[in-house]
Amino acid sequence: MRNSIFLQLEFLLLVAFSVVVPAGIFWIMLAQRAISRTAVLWLGLVLIAVAGVDVALLRLLATRAASTGALPGDNVFASEVSLGLYLLPALFAGIGINLVSHVLIHHLVSAERRFDQNQAQR
């Protein structure tokens, strides 16, 4: 049991980056009555970074589970089932990209509106 993947620091980091950090980000976004575009942009970028960290940790755990005498529960990281674990980071990256694109589109619409107003004044 001492060599179990579930007792390593990387697994605890995976849980933190897969559950705790995204839950905190979603709570911040939902609890605020008003939120700035800059905050939305940063929260989206953090979600994308969290997805990257999750994928890196999943790959590290899969490598360790395959190279060590893995216990039966550790095979989750070294088998085809591990593909399902990559869905959560994909979801976070998708939401993060959506938030970033929302901010960029809103900015571009505002910039186009200002450009049109400047052209009309000339």
Image (tube, helix red, strand yellow):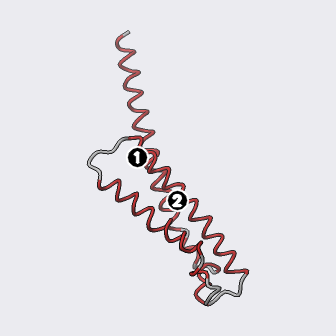
Using the image as rendered, state which of residue 79 and residue 47 is in the foreground.
47
List x then y, in percent, for residue 11. 56, 74
**Residue at 61% of width from left, 81% of height from top?**
5
Q: Residue at x 45, y 62 (%)?
A: 21
As drawn, 8 above or below 20:
below
* Count of residue discs: 2
Residue carrying label 2: 50
Q: Nearer the viewer, residue 4 or 117?
A: 4
Q: Nearer the viewer, residue 98 or 120?
A: 98
State the image coordinates of residue 43 (x, y, percent, origin top left).
44, 51
Q: Spatial distance from mark 1 to mark 2, Cα to Cα?
A: 15 Å
Look at mark 1 in the image and give the residue it sits on. Answer: 40
> Mark 1 or mark 2, which has the lower sequence index?
1
Q: Residue at x 45, y 68 (%)?
A: 19
- Depicted 29 relative to depicted 122: above or below: below
Asked if 41 appears above or below 92 in the picture, the reply is above
Is label 2 in a helix, a strand or a loop?
Answer: helix
Q: Which mark is residue 97?
A: none
Quarter of the image that includes the C terminus: top left
Q: Is residue 63 above or below residue 70?
A: above
- Which corner quadrant of the image does residue 103 belong to? top left
